[in-house]
Amino acid sequence: MSAEYDYIVVGSGLFGSVFAHEMKKREKRVLVLEKRAHVGGNIRTERKEGIDVHVYGPHIFHTDKREIWDYVNDIARFRPFTYSPIANYQGSFYNLPFNMYTFYQMWGVRTPEAATEKLAEQRAGYAGINPKNLEEQALKLVGRDIYEILIKGYTEKQWGKQCTELPPFIIQRLPVRLRFDNNYFSDMYQGIPMEGYTNFIEKLLDGIEVLVNLDFIAQRDEWKSKAKRIVFTGRIDEYFDECFGALEYRSLRFEEEVLEKESYQGIPVMNFTSVDIPYTRITEHKHFLPKYGNPFTIISREYPQSWMRGVEPYYPVNDEKNETICSKYLEKAKTLTNVLFGGRLGTYRYFNMDQVIEQALEAVQRELA
Ligand code: FAD
């Protein structure tokens, strides 16, 4: 008996949607299953009061690869955008990433030479240490002031642990720019889809059968019997019934507020770097796209939280313990001949959107080879 579908794609996030789109273009029979009530995975936006709200956290598309930039712009129009968040520490503002503006705000230094001297002075006591934790690593890389003001509180909120309890590898590098340059990403192309990310995903899924509110795991044998191949972008540990143990994730909670004012903070993203404030960021969604004259604005406060079953897994926790467990799942995945694992949950890795698109395109090429 021939299968009903060539591919059943589990998950309508970026990986699943790009994969399904490419296979549909090649006249494959594709079905997408999505356990949430809507498509788009974590890049989903919802239009409210004329504003595209990034419901699962602020997303800026950026890439150094011309072919990926062209790919997304062939699907939907992206408006060039430069991400320049501000850090708010006890009411004082500092530009990010760490650059001459930040050093001027912090120490009053006006030249790269003066900033270099100040950085050397700040790092001096830690130069020879072999960092045992994140705090020591940060002190060695950038010294006391930047660590205390811009790193410590934010990181502790993000991970729910003291910096002295976190492993040093989390921050391998902390680039400092000795120029006045607030552009957070150094990639050549950067933008926001003009009609929102959901519109972009819907265009990718145009003409493809999609079932939402449907958890593949609950009826996996039935779905497997209907397709030649399964593309799984959910949690790899869940696919294998956590047989080697559950992997850990970090989660987030967003508190959204509609305000009757033109602008709340005047910038899309403000980071709150002091521990006194329980959230890490406030996103003011309207500033991602310049549309003027809207009397409303929408803000989201972002609260990191621990993950447990029933809440969304946002970030993998790639420490030694989880890496050991994950490698067992990845080995087991290789033994399955008709299931392909992809995306951030399917491979237990944090990826930016451009990387996810590239991986989905590569997976398509491998399938067709
Ligand atoms: P997902 O978007 O998670 O899609 C997986 C889908 O599978 C989900 O819809 C899920 O509901 C579904 N699913 C899971 N299990 C099942 C199941 N059993 N049955 C059916 N469906 C299932 N990247 C950038 O490039 N720029 C940014 O600015 C940026 N900001 C980010 C901010 C935050 C807070 C986070 C967490 C990530 C950010 N990223 C950013 C990364 C970006 O979100 C990812 O690259 C992208 O969303 C990954 O897509 P995906 O398809 O792998 O995963």
Image (spheres, rainbow, N blue to C red):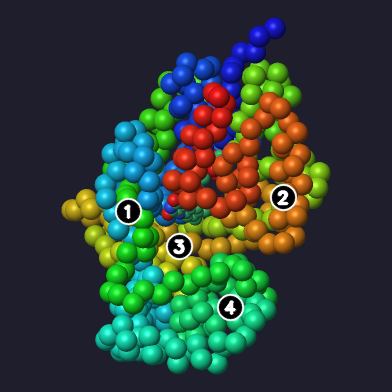
Direction top: furthest residue = 1
Q: CA distance from mark 1 to mark 2?
A: 33 Å
Q: Amino acid at mark 1?
A: Met
Q: Amino acid at mark 4?
A: Gln
- Whole-percent x and y of residue 110? 27, 86
Quick one: label 1 or label 2, which is nearer the N terminus?
A: 1
Q: Is residue 352 left or right of residue 47?
A: right
- Whole-percent x and y of residue 301? 45, 62
- Find disc 3 in the rendering and name its residue: 301
- Find disc 1 in the rendering and name its residue: 188
Q: Residue at x 57, y 88 (%)?
A: 126
Q: Is residue 367 left or right of residue 283?
A: right
Q: CA distance from mark 4 to mark 2?
A: 26 Å
Q: Amino acid at mark 2?
A: Cys
Q: Secondary structure at mark 1?
A: loop
Name the image quarter holding the N terminus.
top right
- Find disc 4 in the rendering and name its residue: 137
Q: CA distance from mark 3 to mark 1?
A: 29 Å
Quick check: marks 1 and 2 in contact, CB under 8 Å? no
- Find disc 2 in the rendering and name its residue: 326
- Whole-percent x and y of residue 342? 59, 39
Q: CA distance from mark 3 to mark 2?
A: 31 Å
